[in-house]
């Protein structure tokens, strides 16, 4: 049966493509990219278990809705408009999460200076402020095993991730999982700011005020409820809409 027989599925795929391309452009705009490396993926609807990821070799500001690569969980490239293939390390990480987590429509991975620095700290991310407290009890850790080219690492990665939406890849970087591209992006935006704030605070050498575990737990719950309402449509996602408006005048070709 042709895809035209499923107009709602076609519409959903088109929306996912546009949102994923927007996330790539926004990650670049905010300075969170790493040349042609790191990745954002989004699972496509349907029983084929396919997902979209960036062509290997394009900078993030070159990614468009129409040049995203479609790949399945076995690593078979289904559609590659640029003919560039995909980053093998990206496939290892993203296929692992997409296979294990039905709720993870989008997986976002970064290597920012702040994120990598915090990933190298023994205590990891500290719940020191409103940004970082949202991750209290919702953050996983995975030890570094080298560049992620060993497919056997996938089982250890997803075991460490569990049901958490965010993971620190020790000595490596950060990873977020979202029920939508918007959620994964906003989690990463807040995670990055949390890392930058932590490093800035530590650089002062002044004693740190650490909120109680009870306050951190309350704050994390408030954030989780807020995200839930936007994912279920109870609240409009005005923040994601505002982020995408950043691209309308300077990068309108991301939708092509």
Image (cartoon, rainbow, N blue to C red):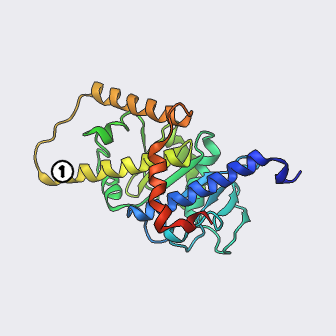
The quadrant in which the C terminus is found is bottom right
Crowding around mark 1 (Cα neighbors within 10 Å: few <14, some 14 to 19, many 20+) is few
Q: Where residue 24 appears, x then y in whole percent?
A: 51, 61
Q: Nearer the viewer, residue 197 or 166?
A: 197
Q: Name which residue lies at 60% across and 41% down.
A: 101
Which of the 4 image quadrants contains residue 78? bottom right
The image quarter containing residue 126 is top left
Viewer can see residue 146: no
* 69 relative position to 6: left or right: left
In-image side of 102 versus 162 (left or right): right
Between 246 and 219, the residue placed more toward the observer is 246
* 231 is higher (above) or lower (below) than 151: above
Number of callouts? 1
Toward the front, the furthest residue is 249
Q: Residue furthest right?
A: 1
Residue in the picture at 38% in, 64% down: 31
Q: Is residue 64 visible?
A: yes
Q: Nearer the viewer, residue 22 or 154?
A: 22
Quarter of the rendering containing residue 214: top left
Query: Looking at the picture, how far across and down is residue 26, in whole percent?
Result: 46, 60
* SS assignment at label 1: helix
- Give the residue at x 53% y 44%: 178
**Residue 215, position in %: x, y?**
28, 27
- Compared across the picture, whether 250 is left or right of 105 comes to left
Looking at the picture, does residue 254 appear above or below residue 177?
below
Q: Position of residue 202 (x, y in %)?
A: 18, 50
Q: Which residue was labeled with disc 1? A: 202
Picture residue at 69% right of the left edge, 61% below the top: 70
Q: Is residue 239 left or right of residue 7?
A: left
């Amino acid at each position: 049966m042709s895809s035209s027989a499923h107009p709602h599925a076609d519409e959903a795929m088109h929306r996912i493509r546009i949102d994923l391309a927007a996330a790539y452009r926004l990650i670049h705009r905010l300075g969170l990219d790493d040349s042609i490396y790191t990745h954002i993926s989004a699972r496509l609807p349907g029983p084929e278990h396919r997902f979209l990821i960036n062509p290997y070799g394009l900078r993030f500001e070159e990614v468009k809705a129409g040049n995203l690569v479609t790949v399945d969980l076995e690593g078979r490239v289904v559609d590659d408009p640029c003919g560039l293939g995909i980053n093998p390390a990206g496939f290892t990480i993203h296929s692992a999460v997409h296979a294990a987590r039905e709720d993870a429509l989008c997986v976002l991975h970064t290597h920012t200076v702040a994120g990598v620095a915090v990933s190298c700290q023994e205590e990891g991310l500290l719940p020191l402020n409103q940004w970082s407290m949202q991750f209290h009890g919702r953050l996983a850790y995975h030890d570094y095993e080298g560049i992620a080219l060993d497919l056997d690492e996938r089982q250890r990665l997803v075991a460490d991730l569990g049901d958490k939406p965010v993971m620190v890849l020790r000595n490596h970087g950060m990873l977020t999982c979202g029920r939508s591209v918007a959620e994964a992006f906003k989690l990463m935006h807040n995670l990055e700011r949390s890392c930058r704030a932590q490093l800035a605070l530590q650089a002062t050498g002044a004693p740190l005020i650490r909120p109680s575990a009870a306050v951190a737990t309350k704050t994390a719950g408030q954030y989780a409820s807020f995200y839930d309402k936007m994912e279920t449509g109870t609240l409009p996602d005005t923040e994601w809409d505002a982020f995408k408006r950043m691209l309308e005048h300077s990068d309108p070709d991301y939708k092509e």
